[in-house]
Amino acid sequence: MATEKSAGPILLELDEATWDAQIDRAASWLGDTLQVQEKFRKFAEDTASEMREPHIKKYLQDIIERARAHEELVRGLIRTIGREPSGGRSLAGAVLAKGGELIADVVGLVGGARGNWKDLRQLLIESQDALGAFAIVEQLGYALGLPELADPAFRAVAEKTKDHLLIQEFVLEMGPVAILMHQHA
Amino acid sequence: MPMTATRASRDALRRLPTSARPAVDPAGVVVPEGYEVEPVLVGLSFPCGMGFADDGSLFLLEGGSTWPTRPYMPARILRLDTASGEVDEIGVEVLGGPRGVAARDGAIYVTVKGGYHAHLDRYDLKTKERTVLVDGLPSGGWHEPSDPVFGPDGLIYFGNGSVSQNGVCLPQGFTVDLAKHPEACDVPGQDVTLTGNNVWSRDPTMPFPFLAETGPFKPFGTPAKKGEVIRGQVKCSSGLWRCHPDGSGLELLAWGLRNPYGLAFDEAGELYASDNDFEEKGERAIADDPDRIWHVKNATAPHGSVATPSWYGFPDLCGDGLPAWHESHRPRKGKAAEPLLEDPPPWAGPAAYLEKPHSCMTHMEFCRSDAFGHHGELFLAQFGTYAPLNTPDPAALDRGFRVLRINMQTGVGEPFLRNREPGPASAHPGSAGLERPVDCKFHPDGRSLYVLDFGVTAVAPTHVVAYARTGVVWRVTRI
């Protein structure tokens, strides 16, 4: 038994090949995040344009502004870890948003709701999806020892959490009149 | 993904890919004259404890879900052959993860935080088979099981901290207890009668944050009644036990130890436990409670003879023996404490050693080597403060972040290993020294002290985060 001293320190899973593979996987998740965020933003735009209640319309427009900034943030985070955002994701986000609107129509009709409330309800689901994606980005930042990934994601998660609560409040407030009276929000 | 451990040059440690800890460099670390310090292994994720076998194998515990609980990284038990530098995996533990380890007779004994229950496990080093020896220790809250240590009697000794931070389960432990373990609560080690003082707080688990009323030894949202008796259990929280190496003969020696993370026997066979202060935040906030080392005197009593466990003060007394509601412990932040126990047991203090609050005393070991020097003194890792999160006291901002050596006979301690500037290296741009020492253990060759560094934790007034892959094993050698 002796204490080994000459061969230098040991790196645990910090060699270049292992690290690159981890960064590739993180970049892939960031691509997913960009896609769901684009889907959320596009859905929010379509929902806001249909909204009649002026306060809700204004709040959604504010959320859209933040959503655009968060979208840009993800593109920046992908570059921060040395990868490039994929252009194809953007188109996919818009297409998925349209798909979400169809789902909202079907679910709304089956549930008895009429009008634009069903879009607001679907927006809540899209918001949860995008919020969760950002929260995972934050955790990836901690898992990789990268504050430049974790810190901006933390701030985005905080903003998106507040936006999500706001959307939830309007879904809950307007739900009964949409379902019982078939009124628009 | 298979584990990779590769040799690197010292120079490579100055350009690590982890920007939270971009470099590891002993130049930022101060040791006494006649000693040198060097990094041995870099890249551990949330390491919480370590222990040597007699052949020089060093068992390293990656904590899994730690402080804070997110993100989980694999709760691996690794073995570093300190002669060859080879690293292999002994096992992967369950959530929350392993916290302390001791090796003996071809096996390692590992304390594990668990979910609702902490446990003591045994791994056969030949087969890597895992056996749970002791289970059912109340957990699912804030604190941790301790190091397991073997006593001179051949029994294994281990502790387990309190479930609540400050005596009542409250929202500050949200990700640990309220979200994952809403039924978790403290359990006393002997019968206690409650005052009926409850604590009001917001309930973050409800659709609206309505108020909730919670009592001691109760899950969050459950109040206590005046005069209510809570029955003591052998498997309590804040306890310290011993048993045979097969898990039989479990005996409770002590309770009321808030966070007994480090245990160590001196050469005379006396047992000591490190313990940490109440936090100065939240709805039962307590200021200026000193960190401490307790002398667990009844560890020398014959096995099976301890009819009544010693009580060390949790949840009502501070480390100095004063009540948590004493004027000297009034909080600057949060709501002041009220008495919880109507009939507190006799206090087993005073402490053998008191330290400034929020130094965060972790694992420790007595030096048994003339070759290393300071024979008979206690070496103790100090993780470092969570200020400004857990206290607004600016004096606490750079406490800890070092290894202390303490003469338990004289009660005098002094830094043995520290950064050139107080606080963690990450608080000082350009420094690449220590972050958060969480363990220190002597190599069986008697010449080196190994120091386990948890890695980078960033603390804000509102929250705390930790970065994986930033843990380091350091070695201090007498030259």
Image (tube, rainbow, N blue to C red):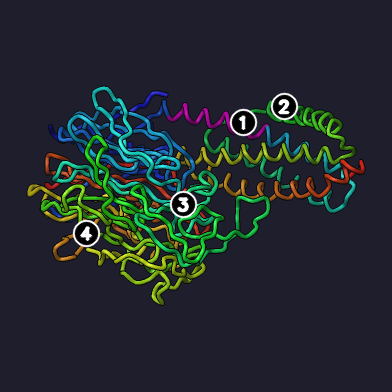
- Which residue is tagged 2? A92
Q: Earlier in the sequence, mark 2 or mark 1?
A: 1
Mark nearer the viewer, 1 or 3: 3
Q: Secondary structure at mark 2?
A: helix
Instruction: Please provide percent x and percent y for residue A92.
Output: 72, 27
- With B209 as the anchor, is B183 left or right in this view? left
- Which residue is tagged 3? B185
- Picture quadrant of residue A75: top right
Q: Is residue A87 above or below residue B253?
A: above
Q: Residues within 10 Å of mark 2 (few under 14, many from 20)?
A: some
Badges 4 and 1, same chain: no
Is label 3 in contact with label 2 (beta carbons under 8 Å)? Answer: no
Q: CA distance from mark 1 to mark 3?
A: 42 Å
Is label 3 in contact with label 4 (beta carbons under 8 Å)? Answer: no
Q: CA distance from mark 2 to mark 1?
A: 11 Å
Mark nearer the viewer, 3 or 2: 3
Q: Is residue A33 magenta?
A: yes
Q: CA distance from mark 2 to mark 4?
A: 65 Å
Q: Is residue B404 magenta?
A: no
Q: Residue at x 30, y 46 (%)?
A: B25
Name the kind of residue labelled 1 in the image. Gly
Q: Chain of mark 1?
A: A
Q: CA distance from mark 4 to mark 1?
A: 56 Å
Q: Nearer the viewer, residue B275 or B70?
A: B275
Name the kind of residue labelled 2 in the image. Ala
Which quadrant is the N terminus of chain A positioned in? top left
Q: Chain of mark 4?
A: B
Name the kind of residue labelled 4 in the image. His
Considering the whole magenta stretch, tell me its main secondary structure: helix
| Magenta-colored span | A19-35
Disc sitting over residue B295 in the figure: 4
